[in-house]
Amino acid sequence: PKRVLSGIQPTGSLHLGNYLGAIKKWVHLQDSGDEAFYSIADLHAITVPQDPRNLRTGILEMTASLLACGIDPEKCVLFQQSKVLYHTQLCWVLASFTTMAKLGQQAQLREKREILQELSTALYLYPVLQAADILLYKATHVPVGEDQISHLNLASFIARGFNKRFGDTFPIPHPFINEDSSRRLKSLRNPLSKMSKSDNDPRSRINLCDSPEEILLKCKKAVTDCSSAVEYDPEKRPGISNLLVIHSSLTGKTIDTICQEAAGMETGNYKITMATEIIEVLRPIRERFHELIKEPAYLEDVLETGASRASACARETWQEVSKRIGIDTSL
Ligand code: TYM
């Protein structure tokens, strides 16, 4: 049977890249009856500077957004990472068997080095903590967008190394990426870089809970090129192609169909048509989010229940691991 785990950082709002790259698959896997654990990765978030006030609201907003997208705490375990103490415990153990050389190779560190003056020690450990997230639940499938592949490869590497040294303990986790919907969504302002929560320009991404006015404005301002035909050519025309991918993934229409419907239309008008359609698709999510965010006590309760269910599973793995490495502590 499949065992599913994934995570998302609670920094900034949930955007279309997260939704199409990962969260839709989370919902699908939860609904297909697989045992699924989904974590709000607050310990990953603090590896770079965060404002404490934003972090607390971010955690509740992320919880509300995930529920609004269809994550159902009756069908999966939704929890806040830091409430389950075993994540940092296992991270330390795994870090003890992972070389600095291996961690220094991460492409993500290079990217971060361009933005930050100094990198925290925790940033080096970032993928080890992610491996601990996955291995604690003995997950076999990890639904993520393609930007997480290198982290997943490291998690498999760590799992294999541990099994070899201490005996079979962890199943090897696999990224769960389905071709189409998980193509990396690009920034609306620069179609060569990915749509990201950490981009300083809010017009670069569409958040699931943006108002219709915001969505319309962001679509209208999306950077395309000087040719006005609506056609799909990700190599030569990344801007319009990114809009087509978004439009197609959200409505379920094929890119061909959309291009036929837009025949003779200029990109300017197409952007308005596209915005109108995606505003409607996102309407139920947006409305549900606004209801849920008024119920912080309910959201806290969901996270509390999730943490105790996650802990019960994590505790078993921890006991097994601690026995195998010879410290044998039950927590
Ligand atoms: P995070 O918070 O950056 O993103 C959450 C999920 O959204 C996907 N994603 C995208 N997919 C397609 N196009 C985009 N533009 C785009 N932007 C984001 C990401 O691939 C991800 O699946 N390190 C992780 C969080 C994490 C985790 C884990 C994931 C912590 N522990 C254990 C899996 C397993 C992260 O920063 O995701």
Image (cartoon, helix red, strand yellow):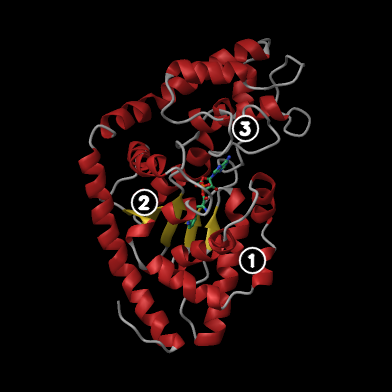
Q: Quadrant of residue 309?
A: bottom left
Q: Mark 3 and mark 2 in contact (Cβ < 8 Å)?
A: no
**Residue 141, image x, y percentages:** 48, 60
* Disc 1 versus disc 2: nearer the observer: 1
Q: CA distance from mark 2 to mark 3?
A: 29 Å
User: Is 302 on the left or on the right of 328, as rendered?
Assistant: left
Name the secondary structure under disc 2.
helix
CA gap, disc 3 and disc 1: 28 Å
Task: Indicate the secondary structure of the residue bearing disc 3.
Answer: loop
Q: Residues within 10 Å of mark 2 (few under 14, many from 20)?
A: many
* 84 relative position to 214: left or right: left
User: Where residue 89 sits: x, y (%)?
Assistant: 41, 71
Residue at point 57%, 72% (across, down): 158
- Of 241 and 100, which appears nearest the observer? 100
Whole-percent x and y of residue 77? 31, 55
The residue furthest front is 117
- Of residues 287 and 189, the one nearer the viewer is 189
**Viewer-side label of 2, 3:** 3
Q: Indicate the amino acid at tag 1.
A: Leu
Instruction: Name the quadrant containing residue 254.
Output: top right
- Residue named by callout 1: 103
Tell me if mark 1 has few (under 14), some (14-19) or many (20+) residues whose alpha carbon lies within 10 angstroms of its own.
some
Q: CA distance from mark 1 to mark 2?
A: 32 Å
- Residue beneath label 3, please? 187
